[in-house]
Image (spheres, rainbow, N blue to C red):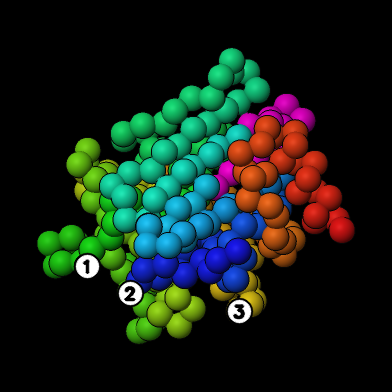
Amino acid sequence: MGDSTVGWARTNLGAGPLGSYAFLVEASLGHRPMTYLFARSTTTGGAGAARAVTVLLVLGPAALAGTRVTTTEVHGAESAEVTTYLPTMRAPKVITAAHVYECLPLTDVGYVDLMAWPHPPTRDLTPDDGVTPWSRWHDLPASTTRVSKAAHGYEVVETVSDVHGIPVARSTVHKGEETRRWEALELGAAEWDHLPVRIRVSRPRTGHWTAFERTTEPRPVPPELLTADSDTLREAVMCVLKG
């Protein structure tokens, strides 16, 4: 099915040798327990650039079930295609330009946190970038931090653990002000490229944070499932995870 290793670091939320896979995530937002289905298909065909399709589907609570975010990416591209759908919508909405750097509906997780790669591609930091360390990962000597700068004033600063080869900390900055943070709290097994078990998202301005926990191991799924309707995707993935 392909390997999730592309470029200077493995894909964000990759699963080792699995090119098409799914797993479940849980979080508590206030008094509402949330359950998400995460699915991704990554292809590296021939001499062409790697491509990834990622789907995040809300399974619960019932009032939000069916909410869906889909990202379609090409490695090295300047931007990614993002669509979001809520059960109250007549049709999915395309997220464009600066809105790509905002959050998913009803959560502090950013669209960029779901993407396989940064867009535009990252470059090395310079002294003028003025990045302030905030994560424990920044204190480790074996880490590399780079920045992705977009034309409309947004920057994504991403730190990769050189030991694990995956992104472990990320912040979104708008016109010099840090708006959101994403951090891996606990990494998973090496066989799955250390796919995080627990992550935390937070807003520096308010101090509000939410932790998310992966509750299943990643399991292989047919890549065509990611373009299926949400009911088909949910039923097929749940059968795989329970089997």
- The residues colored magenta run 54-67
**Residue 61 highlighted magenta (yes or no):** yes
Which mark, by number, is residue 144? 2
N-terminal label among 3 and 2: 2
Question: What amino acid is at disc 2?
Answer: Thr
What residue would you read off at disc 3? 190
Q: Residue at x 75, y 33 (%)?
A: 231
Tell which residue pokes out farthest to the top in this image.
90
Which mark, by number, is residue 124? 1
Residue 171 picture location, percent across and down: 37, 55
Question: What amino acid is at disc 3?
Answer: Ala
Q: How many marks?
A: 3
Tell me the element at label 1. strand
Few, some or many residues within 10 Å of mark 2 (<14, 14–19, 20+):
some
51, 116: nearer the viewer: 51
Quadrant containing the N terminus in the rendered view:
bottom right
Q: Residue at x 54, y 24 (%)?
A: 92
106 relative position to 10: left or right: right
186 relative position to 79: left or right: right
Q: Residue at x 33, y 74 (%)?
A: 144
N-terminal label among 2 and 1: 1
How far is mark 3 from mark 1, CA to CA? 27 Å
210, 147: nearer the viewer: 147
How far is mark 2 from mark 1, CA to CA? 9 Å
Q: Residue at x 57, y 34 (%)?
A: 106
Tell which residue pokes out farthest to the right in this image.
243
Tell me the element at label 2. strand
Residue 50 lies in quadrant: bottom left
**Residue 206 highlighted magenta (yes or no):** no
Few, some or many residues within 10 Å of mark 1 (<14, 14–19, 20+):
few
Residue 183, can we see it? no
Q: Which label sits in the foreground, 3 or 2?
A: 3
